[in-house]
Amino acid sequence: LDEIIMFNKLNRSDMDLIVDVQVSKLATRLANRNISLTLDENARHYLASRGYDSHYGARPLKRVIQREIENILAEKILRGQVVDGQNIRLSYENEALVFSVENSPVVV
């Protein structure tokens, strides 16, 4: 290789956009079960900061999302704490991600 390519560091808004893209991929998979996933700004900023590395950029983000969202949601689904048709809202409060179930389906 004879050329040098310069990359700019990602800023906060770049990371927020990357978080949105990665979370939307998870939300698409959850939509197959009619489960929606949304996150507030605090959760988005938290994931962006945890998923950023000064050397690797946004590469760690997928692992952070898997560890801190996907794995927990999978456990909640297996335990029946989250069922098809529910809306999950992620927020970041008191230094932790908080999963809130909204619009629970009515059981007849």
Image (cartoon, helix red, strand yellow):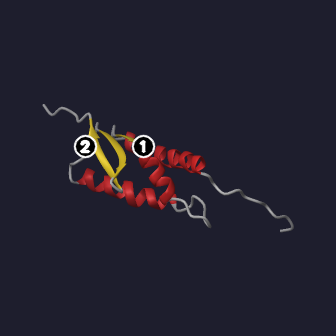
Judged from the image, the secondary structure of the residue bearing numbered disc 2 is loop
- Residue 2 drawn above or below residue 84: below
**Relative to 87, is 52 on the left or the right?**
right
Task: Give how far across and how far down residue 100 sits, in percent.
Answer: 28, 44
Q: Earlier in the sequence, mark 1 or mark 2?
A: 1
Task: Give how far across and how far down residue 4 sits, in percent.
Answer: 82, 64
Crowding at dot 2, Cα within 10 Å, few <14 / some 14-19 / many 20+, comes out as: some
Identified by mark 2, the residue type is Val
* Rendered image: mark on residue 83: 2
Residue drawn at (63%, 54%) of the image: 10
Residue drawn at (53%, 47%) of the image: 16
Mark 1 — residue?
27
Identified by mark 1, the residue type is Ala
Q: CA distance from mark 1 to mark 2?
A: 14 Å
Which quadrant, please, contains the N terminus? bottom right
Crowding at dot 1, Cα within 10 Å, few <14 / some 14-19 / many 20+, comes out as: some
Judged from the image, the secondary structure of the residue bearing numbered disc 1 is helix
